[in-house]
Image: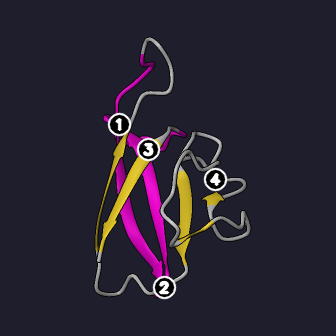
Amino acid sequence: MNTDGTIVAASPEVELDDRYTGKFTGYTGLYSIAFNRSVDSCAWVAAVWDDQAPFTGKGFATPFKLGFNQLGVSVSSTAGAEMDAPFSLIVAC
């Protein structure tokens, strides 16, 4: 996902409707990704990636469950401050 919450690439299971997938309006570093199936029995991992050269900062992407078919991702700097940054999310079911 790009910094602005737009999708770079997605599997067919990702819900592309921006009402459910994208950046939370009014918040720094919070994103949501909805799926057309349950993610209850899935494993997920996220990582910040570089969309600029040179990379302007390092950070962490922490996924969490929002609902049976929706995950959230919180992005923060290495100092723990929320930040907007691009990330990849992998969900294995």
Spot occupied by residue 16 in the image (x, y as percentages of width and height): 65, 64
Q: Which residue is mark 2?
A: 37
Tag 3: amino acid = Phe
How far apart marks 1 and 4 lie (CA) works out to: 17 Å
Give the camera-side residue of 56 and 68.
68
* Residue 70 vertical position relative to residue 28 in the rendered view, above or below: below
How far apart marks 3 and 1 lie (CA) works out to: 10 Å
Tag 4: amino acid = Tyr
Q: Residue at x 50, y 20 (%)?
A: 52
Circle 3 — which element? strand
* Residue 46 vertical position relative to residue 32 in the rendered view, above or below: above
Q: Which residue is mark 1?
A: 59
Circle 4 — which element? loop
* Residue 11 vertical position relative to residue 1 in the rendered view, above or below: below
Choose the circle earlier in sequence order: 3 or 4: 4
Q: Residues within 10 Å of mark 1 (few under 14, many from 20)?
A: many
Magenta-colored stretch includes residue 6: no
Tag 1: amino acid = Gly
Q: Tell us which disc is closer to us: 4 or 2.
A: 2
Spot occupied by residue 75 in the image (x, y as percentages of width and height): 44, 47
Choose the circle earlier in sequence order: 3 or 1: 1
How far apart marks 3 and 4 lie (CA) works out to: 16 Å
Choose the circle earlier in sequence order: 1 or 2: 2
* Residue 71 vertical position relative to residue 10 in the rendered view, above or below: below
How far apart marks 1 and 2 lie (CA) works out to: 29 Å
Choose the circle earlier in sequence order: 3 or 2: 2
Q: Quadrant of residue 78?
A: top left
Q: Which residue is mark 3?
A: 87
Q: Which residue is mark 4?
A: 27
Q: Quadrant of residue 91?
A: bottom left
Q: Which residues are magenta?
A: 55-84
Tag 2: amino acid = Arg
